[in-house]
Amino acid sequence: MSRCLIERDLEDVNATLVRARAECDKFRSLWVGDDTGGHYKLRTPLGSIEGTYTVDGKHVCFQVEKKPRIVPCALIERVLDEFLRDG
């Protein structure tokens, strides 16, 4: 169990968080929180990814606290960036 820290500046934090919650619902994952912070538990075929997020203005910090050992932080970061770009 290793940790990852991913920080990004977003144009529209609120819209991104609404979309994240909707995507989590589609895959029976969990996203709880608001535009100041919260936590998530994302289901993947390799195991769950769990963590928290905090928001400061347009800056969002994602702290991955639990992930499958075989999933590198770089992969999680790349998938997150694709999700943010598609928004």
Image (cartoon, helix red, strand yellow):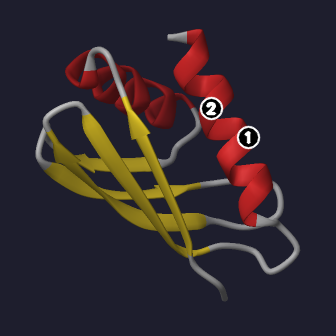
Check residue 40 in the rendering and tell me which mark sits there, or answer none.
none
Residue farthest along the right direction in this orientation: 70
Give the vertical position of 52 relative to 76 (above or below).
below
Residue 81 x, y percent position in the rendering: 62, 32
Q: Are marks 1 and 2 in contact (CB under 8 Å)?
A: yes
Q: Which residue is mark 2?
A: 81
Q: Secondary structure at mark 1?
A: helix
Task: Left or right? Give the position of 78 relative to 71.
Answer: left
Residue 59 x, y percent position in the rendering: 27, 39
Residue 22 x, y percent position in the rendering: 40, 24
Q: Residues within 10 Å of mark 2 (few under 14, many from 20)?
A: few
- What whole-number distance in Å separates the C-alpha atoms at marks 1 and 2? 5 Å
| Residue located 43% across and 39% down the image | 8
- Quarter of the N terminus within the rendering: bottom right
Q: Which residue is mark 1?
A: 78
Q: Callout 1, which amino acid?
A: Arg
Q: Callout 2, which amino acid?
A: Asp
Residue in the foreground of this view, choosing between 45 and 12 = 12
Give the vertical position of 68 relative to 37 (above or below).
below
Q: Secondary structure at mark 2?
A: helix
| Residue located 21% across and 22% down the image | 14
| Residue located 22% across and 56% down the image | 38
Residue 5 x, y percent position in the rendering: 50, 65
